Structure formats: C-alpha cells, structure tokens
Image (cartoon, rainbow, N blue to C red):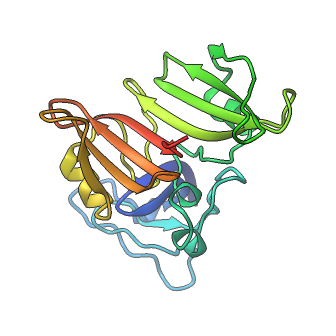
Amino acid sequence: MWRDLLVWVSGGGAQAGPRRLRFDGASYPTNASEAPRAAAAGEDARLLIADDGMAAIAAAPLLLPPGCAAGPAAEATSVTARESLGGLCVGSNVGEVERLLGAPAQRGAPELWGADGLYHRQWRYPQQGIVLRLSAPAPEGPWQVESLTLEVPARLNSARGIGIGATEERVRAAYPEATAARRDPGGTLILTVGADYDALIFGFDPGGRVARVFLGAPAE
C-alpha cells in the first residue's frame, strides 16, 4: 500500500515548495541498516532518493501563489519574479498572505505616493519577524505585495533555501552571483542578488549570520 506525505522541500538549488513523498512498506525497511529498494519500472516515481532512506519522491505541482513564477521560464526573468520567501513573493495578493501568515498584528494606513500614483501601506507581523509592503491602485485595493522583509525570529526561506541564521558560506553557495558591500568601514556585510529596483538582499550580523532578508525594490 502506498503512503503519501506532503512536506516542504527547499535548498540544494531547487525551487522551494511542497512535494509529495511516496512510500510503501516494502521499500522502507524496518531494519535501518538495509538500503531501500529503488522504485521498480512502472511505479509512479519521478525522482529516486536512495541515500536518505526514502524510496521515491513523486512529482507534485508547486503550490505557489499566482504572483510567483515557477519553472524554467522563471530563471530567465527578474530576481523578484523568480524568488519567494516562504512561498510569498512580489505580486502575491493579501488573500495569499493571510492564508500563509494569518492576519497581521499591525496594518498601516494607505498612503498615496505621487511618484507612482499608487497607494502604499505596511503589514507587520512582529512575532514572526515579517514586514510586508503592499501597493494598490485605490485605497480599497486590490492590494498586493511589493516587498518583503524578514528579521529575527522569521523562519521563512528563500527559493534556494536561505533564511535568518544562515552563514555567509551558505548564502554564497546558494547565490554565487551575489555581490558584496559593507554599510560603512567596519560595518556588517550585505550580499545583494540583483540591482537597485530588483533585488534579494541578505544583511549579516557581526557574527557572520543572516539577520535580515529583503525581497523587492530597495531603491524605492
């Protein structure tokens, strides 16, 4: 009998998201020293994993919000189009936000910006270490995410599995294209993927671990 388990998979350069792990009794031995068998021909398995005791991982669609890009086409687009933090991305609507995070503890009042003619506001989740900046064409909406900021104790990860507490080594391995800068002489390190209006930014604490993650347009 097959057993399915939906889990969140991230890291290793793969697009983060839910996957369905599929097991059967014969393929997951009671003796941990025994290697599990590989999936036989005809079984519904797309990726086989033998080194961690799982028989197979069956393909399942990524449950990304409509605003998040996925698949090979996303790799050729902008940073904010292909990146996400915990399944949220630039373009996610407030319904998607509340399904993943719940209602915000603080909702900022809408403010009209003359620079772009849009209304802007912030949603804050201080207990989760998350701040979202939203924009809309009118005070009543529809509102969508235009930037995301993570700080301690946030537990969301980027599309390549990087979150608060990650080391500089891990960030550079996941994002070799990142460029480095420092706030000031002797200041903390910042690694940036992208450009002024399209970026994923990792800020580090004095101990060399990620203390802040930003996705959006930092120059705004």
Give how far across and how far down residue 201 sits, in percent: 39, 45
Q: What residue is at 17 percent from the left and 37 percent from the top?
A: 208
- Residue reaching furthest to the front: 114
Residue 179 location, quadrant: bottom left
Seen in the picture, residue 26 relative to 132 is either above or below; the reply is below
Q: What residue is at 63 percent from the left and 25 percent from the top?
A: 122
Quarter of the N terminus within the rendering: bottom right
Quarter of the C terminus within the rendering: top right
Q: Please give left or right for residue 168 compared with residue 217 in the image.
A: left
Give how far across and how far down residue 16 sits, in percent: 49, 54
Residue 100 location, quadrant: top right
Give how far across and how far down residue 202 sits, in percent: 34, 43
Task: Report the front residue among 103 and 218.
Answer: 218
Q: Please give left or right for residue 51 compared with residue 154 in the image.
A: left
Q: How many marks?
A: 0
Q: What residue is at 18 percent from the left and 33 percent from the top?
A: 187
Give how far across and how far down residue 193 sits, in percent: 39, 56
- Residue reaching furthest to the bottom: 41
- Residue reaching furthest to the left: 186
Q: What residue is at 40 percent from the left and 28 percent from the top?
A: 151
Seen in the picture, residue 16 relative to 41 is either above or below; the reply is above
Q: Please give left or right for residue 97 compared with residue 26 in the image.
A: right
Seen in the picture, residue 131 relative to 42 is either above or below; the reply is above
Task: Report the front residue among 134 and 158.
Answer: 134
Task: Report the front residue among 127 and 121.
Answer: 121
Seen in the picture, residue 58 relative to 198 is either above or below; the reply is below
